[in-house]
């Protein structure tokens, strides 16, 4: 294994760990969303950060209807 391979592996591990920690505490990853939109849907405008965050909260917790707490 080359030193450059080891450095790249460390970077990948660091990015993966950071992403996992954000997901564990419920922080959506806007940068990943932007990259996805650019790659898979280049003709569509991405949501603003505020709209993205609101949509992720609703997807996670729902609209609040039917919940007891």
Image (tube, helix red, strand yellow):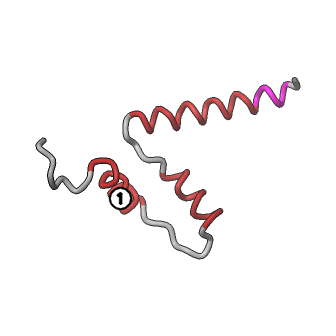
Question: Crowdedness of circle 1 by 10 Å Cα count: few (<14), some, many (20+)?
Answer: some
Judging depth in this view, the residue of 63 and 8 nearest the camera is: 63
Quadrant location, the N terminus: top right
The rendered magenta stretch, by its main secondary structure, is classed as helix
Q: Is residue 54 left or right of residue 31?
A: left
* Residue 59 drawn at (x, y percent): 34, 53
Q: How many marks?
A: 1
Q: Which residue of the protein is positioned furthest toward the right in this rendering?
A: 2
Q: Which residues are magenta?
A: 3-7
Q: Considering depth in this image, is 64 or 6 the residue closer to the camera?
A: 64
Identify the residue at image location x=83%, y=30%. 4
Q: Position of residue 11 (x, y in %)?
A: 68, 32
**Vertical side of 43 occupied by 26: above or below:** above
User: Which residue is under mark 1?
Assistant: 55
Q: Residue at x 50, y 67 (%)?
A: 46
* Residue 48 sits in quarter: bottom left
Image quarter (top left, top right, bottom left or bottom right) of the C terminus: top left
Residue 53 in the image: state x and y as whole percent.
Answer: 37, 54
Label 1's element? helix
Dividing the picture into quadrants, the one containing residue 7 is: top right
- Which residue sits furthest bottom? 43
Q: 47 left or right of 64?
A: right
Q: Residue at x 18, y 53 (%)?
A: 64
> Would residue 10 appear left or right of 58 to someone viewing this image?
right
Q: Is residue 4 found inside the magenta-colored segment of the image? A: yes
Tell me where residue 2 appears, x and y as whole percent: 88, 26
**Going 44% across and 38% down the picture, which residue do you hit?**
23
Q: Is residue 17 left or right of residue 48?
A: right
């Amino acid at each position: 294994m080359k030193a450059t391979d080891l450095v790249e592996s460390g970077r990948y591990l660091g990015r993966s760990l950071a992403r996992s920690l954000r997901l564990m505490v419920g922080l959506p990853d806007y940068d990943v969303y932007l990259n996805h939109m650019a790659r898979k849907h280049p003709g569509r405008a991405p949501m603003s950060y505020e709209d993205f965050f609101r949509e992720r909260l609703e997807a996670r917790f729902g609209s609040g209807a039917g919940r007891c707490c």
